[in-house]
Image (tube, grey):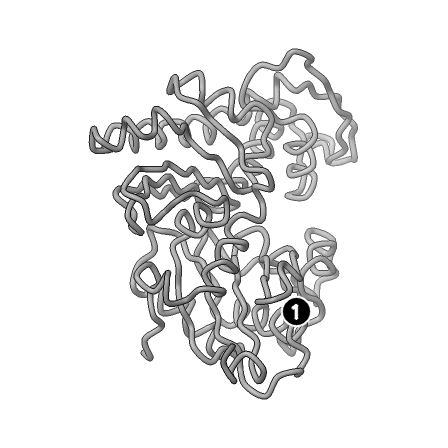
Amino acid sequence: MSIFDFISSDIGIDLGTANTIVYVKGEGIVLSEPSVVAIEKSTAKVVAVGTAAKEMLGRTPEEIIAIRPLKDGVIADFEITEKLLSSFIKRVIRHRYLMKPRIVISVPSGITEVEKRAVRDSAENAGGREIFLIQEPMAAAIGVGLPVDQPSGSMVTDIGGGTSEIAVIALNGIVNNISIRIGGDEMDEAIMLYLKKNHNLLIGERTAEEIKMEIGSAYPMNEENSKEIKGRDLIEGIPKTLKISSAQIREALSEPVDAIVEAVKQALEQTPPELSADILDRGIIVTGGGALLKGMDKRLRDETNLGVNVADEPLTCVAKGTGIVLSNMPKYSRILMKGKKA
């Protein structure tokens, strides 16, 4: 153990469009909160961050706005992301250490250089000493416990809030990957649009997310169910209650789900034949919040004729992966992107 371990605390961050999960070396996952910041319009003062801010989505008075600073897996609002990170870092470190932490932070594999710099700068300004970036599918594979350093291939499908990443990994590298900016957010939007178009009912993001989690599915279920939802009638302008079935919501979700399935098939087509044989043996591992959509594994199995396994705790795989990397930086140095000073 080096002297640094006593005077600084290293942290891993899964900076997600929907949620941010923080892993502290030696302690495990210490924080998992929505990536939302509520600020006062006139002063730009932060009113709430995380869960408290998400509660305010769609319910704030005019002078307060609740912002989600990440869109499609990347930073859409630099200053707000910095405030989000800074708040979470302060919360988990609490000035017990003399030095700023080293941070390993996950990013989508399809990220541009400009977007990488935005992540690095945000993490640095929020209090990081050294910033390392790791691609999300790689972090997810490590978090699940796949042998990423072996010559045999593994396929990971990480369905997040803003992006879906499909990657084939071997010998500490991503052999081929497809990153599409479609995830849980697009599913929520599809539900909102469906209800607006077919039932003249206007609902908010939080209601759409609840519907998706409770009765959303990607594959016909043995037992279809329904849910009563409340929203505003677009014609009469008054609140209205509507009963909706899981089959209707599956129809609403068909477009984003189809896009994810297509991306998986495309990734399989691009995979070298030697590695395809490994995937045939090992199957596809699904991680991320989207893995929890009912029937997602069955739908992928049906379309690819491969074994599909949902990770044990799909939401935390990426954060766990950053933690495993932190515990053995020399071993994983090849897969980390060092944060260059801009």
Q: Position of residue 61 (x, y in %)?
A: 74, 61
Q: Residue furthest bottom?
A: 98
Q: Which residue is nearer to you in this view: 72 or 230?
A: 72
Vertical relation: 325 (above or below) 46: above
Q: Is residue 119 left or right of 41 when viewed as pictured?
A: left
Q: Is residue 103 left or right of 21 when viewed as pictured?
A: left
Q: Identity of the amino acid at label 1?
A: Ile
Q: Position of residue 259 (x, y in %)?
A: 40, 30
| Label 1 SS | strand
Q: Position of residue 166 (x, y in %)?
A: 37, 39
**Residue depicted at x 34% and y 29%:** 279
Q: Which residue is nearer to you in this view: 18 or 150?
A: 150
**Residue depicted at x 63% and y 69%:** 88
Quarter of the figure that contains the C terminus:
bottom left
Q: Position of residue 90 (x, y in %)?
A: 64, 76
Q: Which residue is nearer to you in this view: 171 or 191?
A: 171
Q: Which residue is mark 1?
A: 39
